[in-house]
Amino acid sequence: MKVAFYGHARQYHNLKADLDAAISAVLESEQYVLGPTLKRFEGELAAYFGSRHAIGLNSGTDALWLPLLALGIGPGDEVITTPNTFFATAEGIWFTGATVVLVDCDADTKCLDPDLLEAAIGPRTKAIMPVHLYGQCAPMDKIAAVARRHGLAIIEDNAQAVDAAGDTFRIGELSDAVGTSFIIQKNLGTFGDGGAVVTDRDDIDTVVRRLRNHGSPARSKHSMGYNSRLDDIHAGVLSVKLKHITAWSDQRRAIAAKYSAALADCQGVLKLPVERPGYRHVYHLYVVETLNGKRDELLACLNAAGIDAKCHYPITIHQQDGYPWGKQARIVGSVANAEWNAANCVSLPMFPELRDDEVDYVIEQTVAWCRANG
């Protein structure tokens, strides 16, 4: 049996009539950039998040970078984040000229450990960028409490966690802005790339809207800015898909529960995902960690069996070739948890259109490997 990691074509065929109609409507409108379809989707997205503003951009990377610029963060400033994330988290900070400050993740949830923030804050610290990794919220209540004590801004990296929530908070409620990615493999993804900033702050909304369109407040008027616009075809696709995001998240959670129940006997060999009590984890990824140092062997075994398992992210930010040692980056304390996560993580197939027989096959092959390597 072959089990894919992504189900893009299945999702398209399930929604084909609605998606084709949405794309056709944009094509017939002749308004493809900053048109009415984008405006409508921005309103829908803001309402979904319970926020006042949503600004469509061309990538999730820009959705982290541009709100930092809107907050005036630049050279000489520092932004705290965590090293076990996609490289774009750090890039968004570096694009402003600011310094990335890395602190470790929690050993269980893999999200930023709020107990390590105080030691990382200095006179140049201006913001914290927590990552909602794999689909689980970082502990925003604790992070926000630290930020308030020190007068720091918060930009949430929400590339992987649309529809997630904490036990007492929703995404965006305790921060200045949220950056979200719409690249196709995300839980809410378009047929290509895209992103958005969601915020309650009028000033961030105004500046990001100008920055995404060459600094333009009105047609033919420009200051310095960039070209970072979510086009209307992508907005039309996302508008259709947004209506299904809660049902898809529920299905991801059901698949994750099946994985966890069936793999419970493997816990001497694998560490399974830990979901914080009361949180809504939406399982963008279902990530296990090998406890015997044989991550590559497990991955090779699953791949040989036709299962397209992957690793997210096998190289931490500070272990990447592009990490600017001694320039715009520093590490505070040990980052052993992040390094362990990177060295031992395996992502099992996870998308809402996975069939029961496919999930069963992934479980069967994973359990067999664990028994042979326990």
Image: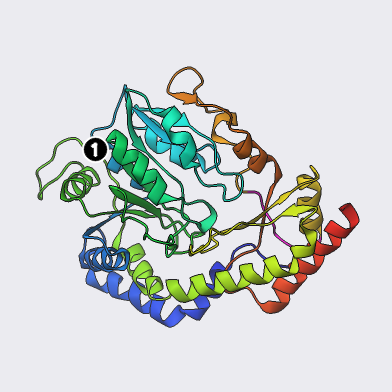
Label 1 residue SS: loop
Question: In this figure, what is the number of numbered marks?
Answer: 1
Residue beneath the point at 30% across and 47% down: 228
Residue bearing mark 1: 71
Residue beneath the point at 28% across and 43% down: 67
Q: Along the line of sight, which residue is nearer the eye, 152 or 179?
A: 152
At label 1, which amino acid type do we have?
A: Leu
Residue 217, percent across and down?
11, 47
**Which residue, as the protein is rendered here, is positioned at the far top?**
326
* For residue 190, side relative to residue 148 (left or right): right
Residue 162 lies in quadrant: bottom left
Q: Is residue 205 above or below residue 328?
A: below
Label 1 crowd bin: few (<14), some (14–19), many (20+), radius 10 Å: some
Residue beneath the point at 14% across and 36% down: 223
Residue 295, percent across and down?
76, 46
Quarter of the N terminus within the rendering:
bottom right
Q: Is residue 292 above or below residue 55?
A: above
- Highlighted range, magenta: 305-311
Q: Main secondary structure of the magenta part?
A: loop
Q: Is residue 223 above or below residue 370?
A: above
Residue 233 lies in quadrant: bottom left
